[in-house]
Image (spheres, rainbow, N blue to C red):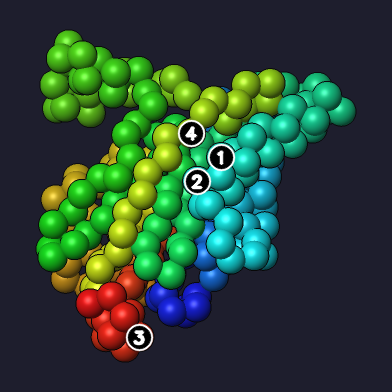
């Protein structure tokens, strides 16, 4: 699917356990996001759906507005809407979601991130993580108390320290990433990264030039690894040739 001058593909899979898919995703002309409703909380699919619906509204914004301001306001609005829903329906108290979004300004992306969904950039064959996990084990790794390998097996590896919730809206991590021709961006829920090693993800992104095939392969790897969690991917390819190279190459 072509979104403006970008090539974008969205895939989502409920996982081996079946049930409700609490992941949501959006890919528009400028705004892209993955949101993962918090497991163990009521109606996570409602929270993730609210998140991407708010983000989708940014596609209608006039040009020239600061993307950091837009994304910060979007996160605040998600929190407001979740709080309002919980006030009407007590069953939604505590519901929440992760939120990892990119906003395209024509030359690059601005990102906003809360939680443990992730954003990656593949450039010249090298995969770089653009986000940091807001989890208990990530804080232990950052403090040098456990290794990355130990974090992958930690019993509390899914425990979030930050999420957008009814009654609690943290400030998002914001970042800028100028684009280059041939860049490939990946947004994904932890249903992918929790089951598929990064070297395998990198290999697929390198080998599969077609984003449809790449996204399908990532989902297949998660399922083959016994992935019981919902798995969602948004792949965004910046063109190698044409207007982008002529203007910014």
Foreground: disc 4 or disc 2: 2
Image mark count: 4
Cα–Cα span, label 1 and label 3: 30 Å
Q: Is residue 243 left or right of residue 36?
A: left
Q: Which residue is mark 3?
A: 243
Kindly state the secondary structure of the residue where label 4 is placed.
loop
Q: Nearer the viewer, residue 224 or 130?
A: 130
Q: Are marks 4 and 2 in contact (CB under 8 Å)?
A: no
Q: Which residue is mark 2?
A: 68
Please tell me the numbered disc located at residue 227.
none
As drawn, the residue found furthest toward the right would be 88
Kindly state the secondary structure of the residue where label 2 is placed.
helix
**Which residue: 62% across, 21% down?**
168
Task: Measuring from the top left, give residue 169's x and y in whole percent.
Answer: 60, 26
Q: Are marks 1 and 4 in contact (CB under 8 Å)?
A: yes
**Which residue: 68% across, 25% down?**
166
Name above or below for residue 186 compared with residue 157.
below
Query: Is residue 163 visible to us here?
Result: no
Q: Nearer the viewer, residue 25 or 55?
A: 55
- Quadrant of res 149: top left
Q: Which residue is mark 1?
A: 72
Name above or below for residue 213 compared with residue 135.
below
Q: Are marks 2 and 1 in contact (CB under 8 Å)?
A: yes
Q: Earlier in the sequence, mark 4 or mark 2?
A: 2
- Quadrant of res 139: top left
Kindly state the secondary structure of the residue where label 3 is placed.
helix
Q: Earlier in the sequence, mark 1 or mark 4?
A: 1
Cα–Cα span, label 1 and label 4: 7 Å
Task: Measuring from the top left, give residue 13's x and y in whole percent.
Answer: 47, 55
Cα–Cα span, label 3 and label 2: 25 Å
Q: Earlier in the sequence, mark 3 or mark 4?
A: 4
Graded by Cα atoms within 10 Å as few (under 14), some (14 to 19) or many (20 or more), the crowding at tag 2 reads some
């Amino acid at each position: 699917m072509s979104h403006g001058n970008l090539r974008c593909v969205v895939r989502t899979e409920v996982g081996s356990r079946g049930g409700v898919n609490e992941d949501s995703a959006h890919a528009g002309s400028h705004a892209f996001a993955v949101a993962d409703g918090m497991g163990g909380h009521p109606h996570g699919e409602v929270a993730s759906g609210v998140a991407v619906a708010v983000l989708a509204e940014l596609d209608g914004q006039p040009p020239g507005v600061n993307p950091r301001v837009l994304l910060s306001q979007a996160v605040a609005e998600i929190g407001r809407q979740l709080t309002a829903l919980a006030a009407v329906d007590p069953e939604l108290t505590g519901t929440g979601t992760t939120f990892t979004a990119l906003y395209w300004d024509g030359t690059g992306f601005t990102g906003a991130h809360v939680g443990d969904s992730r954003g990656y950039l593949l450039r010249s064959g090298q995969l770089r993580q653009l986000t940091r996990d807001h989890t208990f084990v990530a804080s232990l790794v950052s403090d040098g108390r456990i290794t990355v390998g130990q974090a992958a097996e930690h019993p509390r590896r899914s425990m979030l320290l930050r999420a957008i919730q009814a009654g609690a809206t943290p400030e998002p991590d914001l970042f800028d990433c100028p684009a280059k021709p041939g860049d490939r961006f990946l947004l994904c829920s932890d249903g992918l990264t929790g089951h598929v090693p990064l070297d395998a993800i990198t290999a697929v992104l390198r080998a599969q030039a077609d984003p449809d095939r790449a996204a399908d392969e990532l989902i297949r790897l998660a399922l083959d690894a016994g992935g019981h969690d919902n798995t969602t991917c948004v792949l965004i390819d910046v063109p190698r040739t044409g207007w982008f190279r002529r203007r910014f190459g």
